[in-house]
Amino acid sequence: MIGIFGGTFDPIHFGHLRPALDMLQGLPLQEIRFVPLRTAVHRMQPVATAAQRLAMVRAAVEGQPGFVADPCELQRTGSSYSYDTLVSLRAQFGPQLPICLLTGLDAFAELPTWYRWEDIAGMAHLVIMRRPGADAVTDPELRRWMEPRLATDPAALAQVPGGLILCRDVTQLDISATAIRSQVAQGLSPRFLLPASVLAFIEREGLYRLQALTIDLNDP
């Protein structure tokens, strides 16, 4: 069973990495594949190039067993849809391997706006990473849709290729990529918010220094 964690990763930081490690340690996952998107659909476009963001992800996961940088979305043109990513992964790994799409609670609440979202839910398990004590899904229609698919035992996900929904509490760190970019633009150090290897890459490439950025603490 593998996990898929997508995002802009502009840059990747501990707010991504710690919850992913919680998932790797708490679920029967062989690996988690970090998939940087190429072209955003539901958010602003990334500042760093595709190659730079992939390099930062590779630097961040190096040395952590079970963490893998996956460039599959960067190799496609057009908008980056989770559906297309799962199609490519199914072609690579076959129809029987259990795949878990890792998502935050806020993103899951927007699931009905995703491209071919019901097909996504059939092709993979949806694992909702939420902070301890977070509110459950409140939309009544989405709640009714998810209830018959809810699993409570992580082991159940390893028995079928997809179609189940699991909610898991994870360590939530109040770190945002937007705030990191803003700090760099202001000449401040984002040290201890992201891996030293990623910070070294940002400094070496001169990333984010000349950007006029607005802090948005909700940016993933």
Image (cartoon, rainbow, N blue to C red):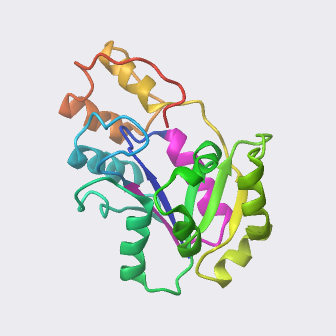
Classify residue 208 by image quadrant. top left
Q: What segment is highlighted magenta in the picture?
A: 14-35
Q: Where in the figure is residue 116, as x and y percent of width and height?
A: 48, 63
Image height check: is 32 above or below 196? below
Measuring 36% from the left and 34% from the top, which residue is drawn there? 44
Q: Where in the figure is residue 102, as x and y percent of width and height?
A: 56, 58
Total residue callouts? 0
Pick whichever, 89 or 149, lies toward us: 149
Q: Where in the figure is residue 167, as x and y percent of width and height?
A: 72, 57
Classify residue 191 by image quadrant. top left
Quarter of the image containing the N terminus? bottom right
As drawn, is 2 to the left or to the right of 84? right
Pick whichever, 175 or 149, lies toward us: 149
Please indicate, yes or no, whether residue 82 appears anywhere in the rendered image.
yes
Please tell me whether residue 34 belongs to the stretch shown in magenta.
yes
Pick whichever, 168 or 117, lies toward us: 117
Measuring 63% from the left and 54% from the top, which residue is drawn there? 22
Measuring 25% from the left and 55% from the top, which residue is drawn there? 78
Q: Where in the figure is residue 197, as x and y percent of width and height?
A: 34, 41
Measuring 78% from the left and 40% from the top, which residue is drawn there? 135
Pick whichever, 57 or 163, lies toward us: 163
